[in-house]
Image (cartoon, grey):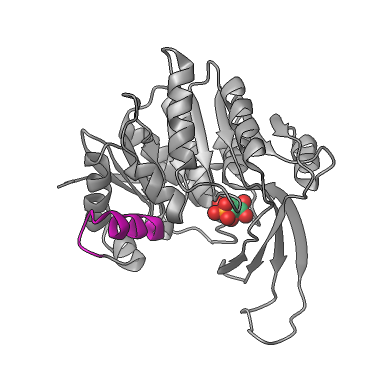
Amino acid sequence: MIVTFTANPSLDRTVALPGPLERGEVQRAVSVSQESGGKGVNVSRALVASGLETIAVLPGADADPVLAGLRHDGVPFAALPIDEPLRTNVALTEPGGVTTKINEPGPVLSEDQQEALIKLLLERARGASWVVLAGSLPPGFPADFYATVTRRLRTAADGGAPLIAVDSSGAPLVAAVADASADGVSGTPDLLKPNAEELAELAAAAGFATASTADELEADPEAAAAAAAAVVRSGVGAVLATLGSKGAVLVTADGAWLATHPPVAAVSTVGAGDSSLAGYLLAHGQGAAPADCLRQAVAHGAAAASLPGSTVPAVHQTTPEAVTITALRKD
Ligand SMILES: O=P(O)(O)OC[C@@]1(O)O[C@H](CO)[C@@H](O)[C@@H]1O
């Protein structure tokens, strides 16, 4: 069972434009669609698509369209009832796949609601193989929320703790990695899934590597592996860094690999990183070696980019056999 946790879920509205986005102009949409989203929710949707057991833990009122969408799609969830509506995030997609995204901040949750959300997660995470903590945090959450949750999951498990994956950005990402142990329990994740931008942000904030921009890391997988290796040396179990159309890099304590997929006709990149994480977890659950977990991650990411909006692929829609794996130096 893989449990996902999305503190700031969203209704993802995708507006398809007939041509390039024109700032300051009126443009007519070709089509509009909407899906229940948020990073953890997308991971759960991708796992369900491949027949895996998962549950999405999130806040949301019973009648919220995000929960209605999950019910409609048959995605199991446990929601903490809140009064405020969840946010709506808009993606403007251009022919060729260029995507502009506008994400709302999300509803404010009181400290009591934050605590109730953690308790709901602890309850649902009993016996899970993985817990995925993903996405931004709603306004008012402390930046070290993921580190706190990670420690509480490990303390509550009383042996047999789930593996913990984190996919976030900004201050919550930096705090998730920087966290020192408290009472002998580490708050750092077993797996971190940054994209190039987040890896660059992390490397700069933590002083891990000589400053590289996201573009430099995407263009230079060795540099991405070096930055990821510094994160692993700081105490994170493994780093799966997705590099957009350039593939992905996996760094563990034992090795570093690059995986690339032949170009696909990109339609929407929204949710491609979440699908990559789902692909990695799917292969990991089947006992695959690290390089083969990476292979499935990239196959899932490429398939997701070729699908519209936040649509996630099932494993049979992916082409892991088309992925090339190269071992990299990690120091
Ligand atoms: O604002 P966050 O939480 O960082 O990201 C939210 C989001 O952009 O992430 C998913 C794609 O990865 C979308 O479903 C969703 O709209």
Indicate whether 56 appears above or below 330.
above
Asked whether residue 306 is in view, the answer is no
Magenta segment, prevailing SS (helix, strand or loop)? helix
What range of the chain is rendered magenta?
A: 196-211
Asked whether residue 191 is in view, the answer is yes
Residue located at (46% from left, 35% from top) = 148
Percent of width and height locating residue 193 = 41, 45
Q: Judge whether residue 276 is colored magenta.
A: no
Does residue 90 appear to the left or right of 306 in the view shown?
right
Image quarter for residue 177? top left
Does residue 41 appear to the left or right of 131 in the view shown?
right
Q: Which of the pair 77/75 is nearer the observer?
A: 77
Residue located at (35% from left, 67% from top) = 215
Residue located at (42% from left, 59% from top) = 245
Does residue 43 appear to the left or right of 331 in the view shown?
right
Quadrant of the rendering where the N terminus is positioned: top right
Percent of width and height locating residue 12 = 69, 55
Q: Which of the pair 319/170 is nearer the observer?
A: 170
